[in-house]
Image: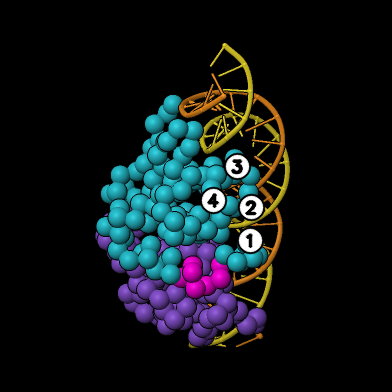
Chain colours: A purple, B cyan, C yellow, D orange
Amino acid sequence: MKPLHHPDRADIQLSSVLYALSDPVRLYIVSGLHRAGELACGSIEVPVVKSTFSHHSRTLREAGLIRVRVKGTQRLLSLRTEDLEERFPGLLKSVLEAYDSSGDKAAFVPEE
Amino acid sequence: MKPLHHPDRADIQLSSVLYALSDPVRLYIVSGLHRAGELACGSIEVPVVKSTFSHHSRTLREAGLIRVRVKGTQRLLSLRTEDLEERFPGLLKSVLEAYDSSGDKAAFVPEE
DNA sequence: TCTATAGTTCGATTATAATCGAATATTAGA
DNA sequence: TCTAATATTCGATTATAATCGAACTATAGA
């Protein structure tokens, strides 16, 4: 099994982070991880098939937004909160607050 | 002459803002506007031709990041700082600080 | 009215990415 | 050792966007 690559904190690029966060599906995933802490892929409900989810997960991981660890047959995702705060102070917080108050999630998840 | 469309403050979408900011050229433009205030297109040096600049300018305007006003033959660009602060508190500030401290601009502007 | 200046629009090209379904890999447990 | 569960990878398709050069628009000023 290939070891999953995570960029070092210092190698996290601002434009990559902003790009990763600019997709509604990925924003939703990030928001969910922020609320719930660590989550398995399967327990995050998004309106895309598994392979597409996997693609988004990878985009988030390679941009440095999330950490992925293997547990049995599952992959557990979590936000790299500390790394991001060190690298770009205040950024993640303001994005998450903006997301919660902006109704962006309504773009693809009608209920809630 | 067509009146330039600017989205109302309440219509500014988070994902669109993040997307607009995820391009190195646009980040550079936004950073320049933040430092200098209002600037004409021609006075912002970017490594792209005029038509490409115009495309980026439009992307920023339609996302709600900048205001464009006409003065003679020039278009003057400025950041919608207040609107953004009201809509997404702290977001623009943290992005600009992250940009200044991250060396992202080195991606296409070697000197400085 | 003519010309120079400042930008935009258009069309074409190229690159990137979002999405899906099918096939594959890995692990847990019977 | 089979099978089920969980997720990734691959290939194809479609959509979006970054870029350029050429043509165009609008305004200022001679």
Q: CA distance from mark 4 to mark 2?
A: 10 Å
Q: Position of residue A38 (x, y in %)?
A: 40, 80
> What amino acid does circle 3 point to?
Lys
Asked if badge 3 and badge 4 are on a common chain, one would say: yes
Examine the rendering and report whether any part of residue A22 can be seen. Answer: no
User: Which residue matches tag 2?
Assistant: B47
Disc sitting over residue B31 in the figure: none
Position of the N terminus of chain A by quadrant: bottom right
Query: Secondary structure under badge 4?
Result: loop
Q: Nearer the viewer, mark 1 or mark 4?
A: 4
- Lower sequence index among marks 1 and 3: 3
Disc sitting over residue B44 in the figure: 4
> What amino acid does circle 1 point to?
Phe
* Residues at circles 1 and 3 in contact by the CB criterion of under 8 Å: no
Residue at screen point 44% across, 60% down:
B35
* Residues at circles 3 and 4 in contact by the CB criterion of under 8 Å: no
User: Which residue matches tag 1?
Assistant: B108
- Lower sequence index among marks 3 and 4: 4
> What amino acid does circle 2 point to?
Pro
* Residues at circles 2 and 1 in contact by the CB criterion of under 8 Å: yes
- Residue B101 part of the magenta segment: yes
Check the image and report above or below for B51 versus C16: above
Q: CA distance from mark 1 to mark 4?
A: 14 Å
